[in-house]
Amino acid sequence: MTSQWQPGTSLPILRQRSRVFAELREFFQQRQVLEVDVPVLASATVTDHNIESIQIRSPMAAGYLQTSPEYFMKRLLAAGSGDIYSLGKAFRDGESGSRHNPEFTLLEWYRCGWDEHQLMGEVADLIATLLPDIAVRRVTYAEVFYQHLQLDPHLAELTTLQRLAVEMGSPAWADESRANCLDLLFSVAVEPKLDAGLVLVYDYPACQAALAKCAEDGQGRKVSRRFEAFLNRVELANGYCELTDAAEQAARFAEDQRLRLESGKAKVAADSRLLAAIQAGLPECAGVALGVDRLLMQMVGVDALDQVMPFSWSRC
């Protein structure tokens, strides 16, 4: 334990970390995207039953450390900010390991009037500025899922997905939801087999829409207008063509709360200020959140976040 006072990263990587922050800011400055500084402590938080927030209680303030700047940024968008980005800290409870830390650095940005395909292009441009000559591939969720599992994820019966989840996971998956089964199957059977380089997977199943709009694909299947970016088979970013319907958003929050109660998790109230902002007029936009620490891992070729962070949780 005597070495635990020391940072996890080396001085050369610490310097590279600083350069990457400067390059990210330069990228958005050149494109006239405004940097915004939003709170990390708030009275409300996400309702997503797969994400746990860190709760803070004190005589002065009781609330949650934010899992991303998304809700505050959407309130700024509704207030007329135009294109914005945030580079700062985010927090999630129960996430620790070589690719997870309770506190991490997140780059999140929103483009007004854009769709998810335009934003995928900008993600590729951003990565190319840091990793020149990176190979880029775009593929639908259905295409890559079928490639490795010979199954249409949009049309497959829930019982089929549960059976495969049991085979690849444990008997506990026999009663899991469609969304959770798909998430397990993708992470176990698809993600490790993705191409090297930057792979942009889009048109996710509608049951995994989260805060994205839904639509029909070219084959008439209902999909969410959502994408994820994987860099050398590591999940790097998650983007949406953002939902702008306040009633639909409230309904999704209610479904999140139902799922939280069903799984025995603490109830989390919907963010009324976010709903009011969407009702007031969230502009048509696309947004994406990118894990900067994971990006640095890929850039320097290391296997753990501890090696690119000054101090991971184990050293705090």
Image (cartoon, rainbow, N blue to C red):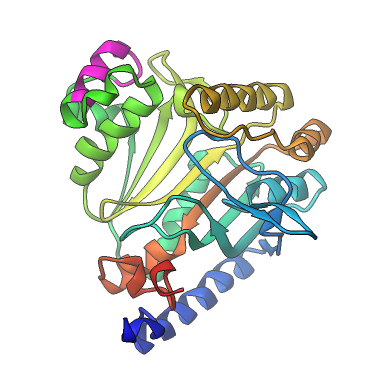
Q: Residue 228: within the magenta? A: no
Magenta segment boundaries in residue numbering: 153-166
Which residue is depicted at the point 28% across and 34% down? 186
Q: Is residue 82 above or below residue 173?
A: below
Q: Give the left or right position of residue 269, taking residue 302 as reference.
A: right
Q: Is residue 26 above or below residue 120?
A: below
Horizontal and vertical percent position of residue 82 = 74, 52
Horizontal and vertical percent position of residue 307 = 33, 74
Specify whether residue 21 is in view. yes
Between 242 and 32, the one lying in front of the other is 242
The image quarter in which residue 158 lies: top left
Which residue is depicted at the point 50% across and 41% down? 51
Specify whether residue 131 is in view. no
Between 33 and 273, the one lying in front of the other is 273
Q: Is residue 88 above or below residue 243?
A: below
Q: Residue 163: within the magenta? A: yes
The image quarter in which residue 194 lies: top left
Horizontal and vertical percent position of residue 122 = 49, 54
Which residue is depicted at the point 38% across and 85% down? 6
Horizontal and vertical percent position of residue 135 = 28, 56
The image quarter in which residue 309 lies: bottom left
Between 39 and 266, the one lying in front of the other is 266
Q: Give the left or right position of residue 72, taking residue 192 as reference.
A: right
Q: Which residue is most to the bottom?
A: 11
